[in-house]
Image: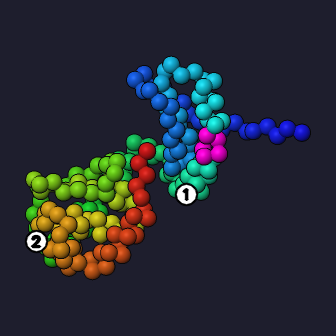
Amino acid sequence: MDSVEKPIAYTLRRKRFSRVLRFAIHQDGRLVVTAPVLIGKRMIEKMIHEKREWILEKLTVARKNAKPVAPKRTRKEIADDKDRALELIQSRIEHFNLVYRLSWKRIAIRNQKTRWGSCSGKGNLNFNYKVALLPPHLADYIIVHELCHLAQMNHSKKFWDLVAQTIPDWRDRRKEIREHEIRLR
């Protein structure tokens, strides 16, 4: 009795100026095939079949290591989170600034795609609204980190010594914050 191979599910993207067929395994365990417009569906299926073992191996690894994706938030939920984040951040900056005595121009709460926060050369502090969703000790780390950039616009020893004045265990917190990877899609 012949065993029938189960087809591999994939998303097909067509690129007009592409010359090659490409396979991409996404972190959430999806296979995305990018193909030139002129390559037919049969050729794509044939290439998937030829690369089947490799694709299945990579999909297994990706699915095993996949982090759960947070459910999409509504605009109202995001707006509420931004308000909460602004209150939290302003309060904690006032608290920590009793030690640092730094000044800034403005604090903005954003829906940043890849950052927890940033500090501009003009003295503006920007924070991802999701800081308010973190455990308080990690939110404090991010807030102090950006606050200290007002004095040191780098990650030199002077910068980390400044952070250590109020967050002596900053190394542990920095490591822990990486476990709270931002899921922004």
**Image check: 90 left or right of 83?**
left
The one nearer the camera, 24 or 2, is 2
**Residue stretch in magenta:** 51-55
At label 1, the amino acid type is Asn
How packed mark 1 is, by other alpha carbons closer than 10 Å (few <14, some 14-19, many 20 or more), is: few
Give the structural element (helix, strand or loop) at label 2: loop
**Which of labels 2 and 1 is toward the front?**
1
Residue located beneath label 2 in the image: 101
In the rendered image, the vertical position of residue 41 relative to residue 75, given as above or below: above
Seen at 35% across and 72% down, the residue is 173
Give the distance between the C-alpha atoms of the residues marked 2 and 1, in whole angstroms: 44 Å
What colour scheme has been applied to the protein in the rendered image?
Answer: rainbow
Main structural element of the magenta stretch: helix, strand or loop? helix
Residue 58 coordinates in the image, percent (x, y):
58, 49
Disc marking residue 65: 1
Seen at 75% across and 39% down, the residue is 5
How packed mark 2 is, by other alpha carbons closer than 10 Å (few <14, some 14-19, many 20 or more), is: few
Residue 138 coordinates in the image, percent (x, y):
35, 69
Give the structural element (helix, strand or loop) at label 1: helix
User: What is the quadrant of residue 51 in the picture?
Assistant: top right
